[in-house]
Amino acid sequence: MTRTDETKDAASNDLTLHLLKYREAARHLWNSFLREDDSNGAVPDGFLLDRWEGIQDELFAALVLRYTGDDTPEKVRLAPGAAKPLPFLKVVPTSPDVPAHVSRTKPAQTYWDHPVRRLGPTDDLRFIAFFDFGSYDYVDFKFFHVFIQGSERHPELAGHEALVEVQYARVLLHEEGTSPA
C-alpha cells in the first residue's frame, strides 16, 4: 500500500491522532529511557542528543508522515534550530479564542511575550514541532510550536511563531489548493 493509498483510506484530513501517538511515544522514550536521572537539568552529552534528534525524526516519519501522501517529504527535521514549518500540516485552534504564546520577534528568539495572547481557527498556523520549556528534564510536549502564516485579526503576526497548547488544537493535512478547515 502506498502512502497515497493510506491517506485515501483515512476518513478525513485530520492527523491529530497520529501526532498525539507520536507525542506519547517520543515523550515516553525520552522520559523513561534516555533522560539522565542525575542530570539536574544539565544538557545531555552530544552523543545522546544526536541520537535523540534522529530518533524523533524517524519516529515522526513512521507515525505521522506516512499518512500525509506522496507529495510530502519522507523525512523532516524536528530538532530545535533545524526544524522548519511543515506547510502540509495546519494547526487549527478548536475555539475562536485559545491561549497562545507568540514570539516577540520574527524569527522567534527566546521570548514568547508578544502582546497578542490569543489565536483562533481563522489564523493560518503551520506545525514546526512539539515544544516544552526546559527540554532536557522530563518532557510533556505540551505545545504545538507553529509558524504563523497569516492572521485575519492580527495581520502583523505573519512570520511570527507561536506556542499553542496541544489540548486546544487539531492538526489537519493541508494540500495545496484545498481548504482544510
Image (cartoon, rainbow, N blue to C red):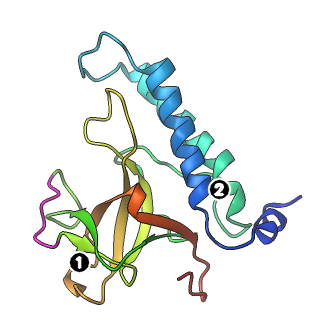
How many angstroms separate mark 1 from mark 2 (CA)? 28 Å
In this rendering, position of residue 176 left or right of residue 165: right
Q: Cβ–Cβ below 8 Å for labels 1 and 2?
A: no
**Residue 2: horizontal and vertical position, in percent?**
85, 61
Query: Which quarter shows the N terminus?
Result: bottom right
At x 37% / y 63%, what residue is drawn? 146
Give the residues drawn in magenta, as a range: 111-116
Question: Total label count?
Answer: 2
20 lies left or right of 83: right
Looking at the image, which residue is at 45% across and 63% down? 127
Which residue is tagged 1? 157
Residue at the spot of label 2: 65
Left or right of residue 150, residue 160 in this image? left
The image position of residue 179, as x and y in percent, is: 56, 87
Name above or below for residue 77 compared with residue 9: above
Left or right, residue 164 beside residue 178: left
Specify the amino acid type for callout 1.
Leu
Residue 32 spot, x, y in % from top left: 49, 21
Was residue 129 drawn as part of the magenta stretch in this picture? no
Q: Residues within 10 Å of mark 1 (few under 14, many from 20)?
A: many
Q: Residue at x 26, y 41 (%)?
A: 133
Instruction: Return the residue nearer the eye: 95 or 60.
Output: 95
Q: Does residue 113 belong to the magenta stretch?
A: yes
Between residues 55 and 132, which one lies in front from this camera angle? Answer: 132
Q: Where is 156 relative to 69, above or below?
A: below
Residue 107 in percent (x, y) is at 24, 63
Q: Residue furthest top?
A: 38
Label whose residue precedes the other's in the sequence (1 or 2): 2
